[in-house]
Image: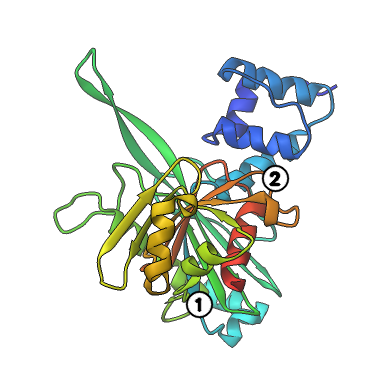
Amino acid sequence: MVTVSRDMLVDIVGQVSQPALKQWLKISELPRTATNTDEFYELLKRNIERGILSLEALREAVLEIEENGGKRIYLRKIEVPARLKNRADFVSHLHDLHLSLSENITASIQMPPNPIINYIVWTPQGLRIKATETNIDLELDYESRSFIEKKVTKYLIALVDFNSGFVQIRLDPPGMLHSHKNSDDKSDPRVYENFYFEWFKNIIGVDELNRYDINGVAEKIVNTQPRIFRLPTELVRTGANSKQRYSCRLDVRDDPARQAAAQADSQNWVYEYLRGYWIPEQSNGLLQRELYMELRRDISMVHFLADCLSDEVDYALSRIRTL
């Protein structure tokens, strides 16, 4: 029997949220009931010691959540360079950058002192790059009237599909304090994001990461029948160039006032921003629950919650690309 300690499990789980791991346990048809942190780690310990969960499977689940959950995923398109498709040529390109290929996806480097590449994995189908860096969040201690610094690891991933040229830049939102400063020496989320766009672009070996065109995608998501997306809130730009907002508990499309407005002008509506849930009923079994997603047309970006898993992200992106 494998014996594990709580400290060992804490080290493996790292910053991954309990809801995310509970969802993974559910999909894996493993016991998942725990009402607090102590019970959660006791649950993992019991599953491992009973032989129904391996340490390797737990590590892989943590890696999956790190690389999918909570990400701002920027959708891009490139003309794939010939040298990127040729392993030897790409190895030579990496050598010029003082980098090297990894044979396999590896465990994350936690709390690095500086931004660092964790791995670069090449296959004939595509490229996968992962970096991590350490940020600082601040928590207010009311008793001492001071801030407590909390170090957090941020996970940054680039995925390139050689066949289509489709690129995903998956970025954790930055913490309050980090090394990417603006001209006023302040931590700046735009500088943070631009750093990774440039770094990944140089590794991939292209001059530009062009925005993947998602014009009209939000409208297709909203108007597809039978419904594939639940829409509790809605903000549109109308034909008269005004903004119109609706919200309700379930779906704004069932609101009579919204229905009347749609009948009059919906063919002219533009969604700059879409927020709602992919629904499992029309997913052909690919979703086991509603999947929250935000979509921003202006920057070709989608955003998922922290407990999102890889199959769920892949489903949403596949629908976006085929609508």
Q: Quadrant of the C terminus?
A: bottom right
**Comparing labels 1 and 2, the label whose residue is closer to the camera:** 2
Can you see residue 107?
no
Residue 308, x across and y down, in percent? 58, 46
Residue found at x 46% / y 76%: 213
State the separation of the CA atoms marked 1 and 2: 30 Å
Residue found at x 60% / y 87%: 82
Vertical relation: 67 (above or below) 158? above
Vertical relation: 46 (above or below) 297? above
Vertical relation: 196 (above or below) 37? below
User: Of the residues under marks 1 and 2, which one precedes in the sequence?
Assistant: 1
Please, which residue is most extreme toward the top here? Answer: 143
Q: Amino acid at mark 2?
A: Gln
Q: Judge left or right: residue 273 versus residue 243.
A: right
Vertical relation: 303 (above or below) 271? above
Q: Quadrant of residue 22?
A: top right
Residue found at x 47% / y 59%: 302
Q: Which residue is mark 1?
A: 77
Q: Quadrant of the N terminus?
A: top right
Residue found at x 53% / y 45%: 109
Q: Which residue is mark 2?
A: 288
Query: What is the secondary structure assignment of the residue under circle 2?
Result: loop
